[in-house]
Image: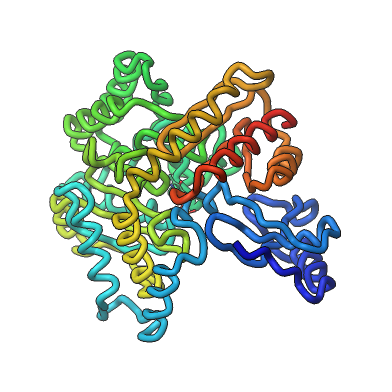
Amino acid sequence: MSLPTPDPDPARGAALLTFDREHLWHPYTSMTDPAPVRLVTGAEGVRLHLDDQVSTGSTTGKSVVDAMSSWWSAIHGYRVPELDAALADQAGRMAHVMFGGLTHAPAVELAERLVSITPDPLQHVFLADSGSVSVEVAIKMALQTQRGRGRPERTRLLTLRGGYHGDTFGCMSVCDPVGGMHSMFTEVLAPQVFAERPPAPGGDVEAWAEGVRRLAAENTDELAGIIVEPRLQGAGGMWVYDDRCLVVLREIADEHGLVLIFDEIATGLGRTGDLFVSSQVTPDILCLGKALTGGYLTLAAVLTTTEVAHAISRSESGVLMHGPTFMGNPLACAVALASLDLLAARGWEQDVRRVSSALTAGLSPLAGAPGVAAVRVLGAVGVVQLDHPVDGAKATDAALREGVWIRPFRDLIYTMPPYVTGEEDLARICRAVAAAAEVA
Ligand SMILES: *Cc1c(COP(=O)(O)O)cnc(C)c1O
């Protein structure tokens, strides 16, 4: 692994950071009191190259293992030769053309692939440009499905506390009402129906199910669908729950004629040990994103059953009312195809199992440590929940000292490493999470 070369002009890095601080928003940050950011000069394998000259005065820069996979997307790591080649090849043909009235091989081949690797009933594909947009489209589809069935009054969604589905307004309305953004936007958010967070594996599914059944029955005339993150609620708190809860939701959806939406933007493509959780319980609509392009470009997909696709087409508009400018972007589709090829060729199952064992071995000793409330490992996800809010800056610095990049939130220090992370780097990640948990 080549070490990052320091910028020949160190003043340049400082100037970038200064402008950044004064003019550029980062996710969930303040313009008047911005949290510090670090300058990345490149990335390769599972490592990010940080320009530490700026922040620490070191003359070499620093390579750190990315335990976040760039927010759960870079499953193959960085500068992946196969993905670089797919991108360059497609760039040599066309970077983008509009999708209205035109089509192209990358989009069609990606749709074919997605239909073939997801459960059989999912046959129709909408290519969206980000996870949040795909959730908006899925919600719109559920409402249009009900209109197509002659039930236009069914416009609300049943969802779970503890969930996260994105940052746009429709998405916000189904995020956890306490931890999410409801308090600030209550007046403008669609009022949805919230069921309790499902119990952790081993918990009382029947008691939970009874509550959800009651809510569905009480609101049946107004409900269009159910939307959940199956098996793992991610950004809403890294909550794991039993697949039996999904069976219950499927039953409720069927009983009341609701459209069941699984948001697998985070769980899809192997992260929790199945290629899709949907292969255990099949939804009517499936959202994919994040890892779809191996972290290279923004792209999401919504898949639906034929029943849903036809009902939408029977609604009064006769069409699905959505079509973003960059729909089906050829570069993104080409790199997504290459990423799916690589996933199969490398044997993702074995990789995820290997990551899972290493995280279990490295993190389970933290259970019972001072300040640690719980340790959870599911597939290639490792979570250490503290009994207090994390001091993000302290935790991040402690991990960086171990050579690892993490991004804790709330009371959680967690890792979702690239599937290709090797044994030594996995051990390093666990040491870093432990160090972060100790100081945070
Ligand atoms: C990240 C995420 C989203 C939002 O995706 P963006 O690409 O950030 O818009 C939606 N749902 C889930 C479950 C996610 O993890």
x, y (%) of residue 342? 34, 60
Question: What count of labels does the image hold?
Answer: 0
Q: In which quarter of the view is residue 327 placed?
A: bottom left
In this view, 421 is above or below 299? above
x, y (%) of residue 176? 49, 35
Q: In which quarter of the view is residue 32 placed?
A: bottom right
Q: Quadrant of the C terminus?
A: top right
Q: Residue at x 60, y 33 (%)?
A: 412
Lateral position of residue 229 relative to residue 410, left or right: left
Q: Residue at x 74, y 65 (%)?
A: 20
x, y (%) of residue 110? 27, 65
Lateral position of residue 400 relative to residue 195, left or right: right
Q: Residue at x 45, y 47 (%)?
A: 171
x, y (%) of residue 73? 47, 54
In this view, 209 is above or below 255? above
Lateral position of residue 286 relative to residue 306, left or right: right
In depth, the one of 325 and 392 nearer the eye is 392
In depth, the one of 241 and 193 nearer the eye is 241
In depth, the one of 412 and 177 nearer the eye is 412
Q: Quadrant of the N terminus?
A: bottom right
Let me know if residue 132 appears in the view: no
